[in-house]
Image (tube, helix red, strand yellow):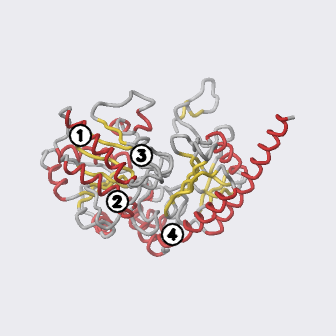
Amino acid sequence: PVLQRKPCGQTAATISSCKLFFPEDPVKIVRAKGQYIYDEHGREYLDCINNVSHVGHCHPDVVKAAHEQNQLLNTNSRYLHDNLVDYAKRLSKTLPEKLCTFYFLNSGSEANDLALRLARQYTKHEDVIVLDHAYHGHLTSLIDISPYKFRNLEGQKEWVHVAPLPDTYRGIYREDHKDSVLAYANEVKKIIDQAQKKGRKIAAFFIESLPSVGGQIIPPEGYFQMIAEHVHKAGGVFVADEIQVGFGRVGKCFWAFQLQGEDFVPDIVTMGKPMGNGHPIACVATTKEIAEAFADTGVEYFNTFGGNPVSCAIGLAVLDVIEKEHLQAHATQVGNFLMELLNQQKVKHPIIGDVRGVGLFIGVDLIKDQEKRTPATKEAEYLITRFKREYILLSTDGPGRNVLKFKPPLCFTMDNAKLVVDKMDEILTDMEREKTCELVGNHH
């Protein structure tokens, strides 16, 4: 957060553009381990939202790799170093063959900014299509392609086109539509046709492989293939933003875009957050053709810290832990169990409108009304506050801030899942009781 020095020797305060979790009663965290974090009083909280500490807070193998490399060398990437090559090789094994060129950077925002530059240089086009409510980073270039942000700022630039979120629960085409995949893909085709009529040309379609800020959305299978066809026909490229959901979080696949089927390959993949388990490291993977077009500018690409020996040592250690601890299989097993428990709650509590997810990426959509599916925003906020009192950290997302999001470290266990859902049951039962008392009181 940004700190401001208060006058007359008062202590510093966070300024209003930076928000803390639980601003009324903030938590001061002093240490963490696995899926638990501890405040200054030694109280233990269960962390259900930290997708940055991907393999668990302060994982000893990751800490050790950082420490050992730090004692040897850390410098910029103008020199040869094995870690960089080894890491690129290891990453390439997880990706489709044609994604064989890697650029290393420090953050997901940097990765998406570079993806935008690569797309424009390769296609010689300017325009970008994004999904409604998307968020792709905090750089100026990315605020421009993030409706989640620009709607509250300068608004939409003419080179940005917003497609509807492929949300089959509360989107424009729902689960009862005869072919929602085709319908959502046609919306993108319409956007391309309209842009071309105005003489505009599409450089890229950007999508989070599983839209998170949009409300933990799972795009229907086959959607990416149809979009890619329209985008390629228009001379654009397909960018899969895996910054929140890559590295085995979805369980059955290493990358969330792979949920769409083996026949789908993006032109550019961006990655960040979980890559370094809390250490700043990010990457853009792309094809040889796109990378060569970028080199043709004659302007070199250089990033002082991107791909430094320490970052790459950490990245390698994270991949080792995912493999050694079978965290993908674990994410599937625990995720399925958590979804099953949540679906049982859905039958019991009418406030739960939808439970959706894959692996350890899960959303619980809270509603006021089963018919209209009105977002239960206040209730969601109340639930989060009550959870915190029970030493469980959860948060909300989605346009209505009514979707509980589960994105815990991948070491989250069956017992953790059961604890959270039991508490949820208790809190929702209390809320229903209070509501009944209120109604009876009002009636009398």
Identify the mark at residue 332; answer none if there is no mark. Answer: 4
Q: Could you tell me which secondary element the residue under label 1 belongs to?
A: helix
**Between residues 54 and 124, which one lies in front from this camera angle?**
124
Residue type at tag 3 = Leu
Contact between marks 1 and 3 (CB within 8 A): the answer is no
Disc 2 residue crowd, few under 14, some 14–19, many 20+, Cα 10 Å = some
- Please name the residue that numbered disc 2 is placed on: 222
Report whether 152 appears left or right of 38.
left
Give how far apart the Cα atoms at labels 2 and 1 are: 21 Å
Which callout, 2 or 1, points at the residue further toward the start of the chain?
A: 1
Disc 4 residue crowd, few under 14, some 14–19, many 20+, Cα 10 Å = many
Which residue is at the far right?
Answer: 444
- Please name the residue that numbered disc 3 is placed on: 165
Contact between marks 2 and 4 (CB within 8 A): the answer is no
Q: Could you tell me which secondary element the residue under label 4 belongs to?
A: helix
- The image shows residue 272 at horizontal and vertical percentages of 39, 54
Residue type at tag 4 = Thr
Residue type at tag 2 = Gly
- The image shows residue 30 at horizontal and vertical percentages of 62, 52
Q: Nearer the viewer, mark 1 or mark 3?
A: 1
Q: Residue sitting at 38 percent across and 60 percent down? A: 221
Tally the numbered discs: 4
- The image shows residue 26 at horizontal and vertical percentages of 65, 42
Disc 3 residue crowd, few under 14, some 14–19, many 20+, Cα 10 Å = many
Q: Could you tell me which secondary element the residue under label 3 belongs to?
A: loop
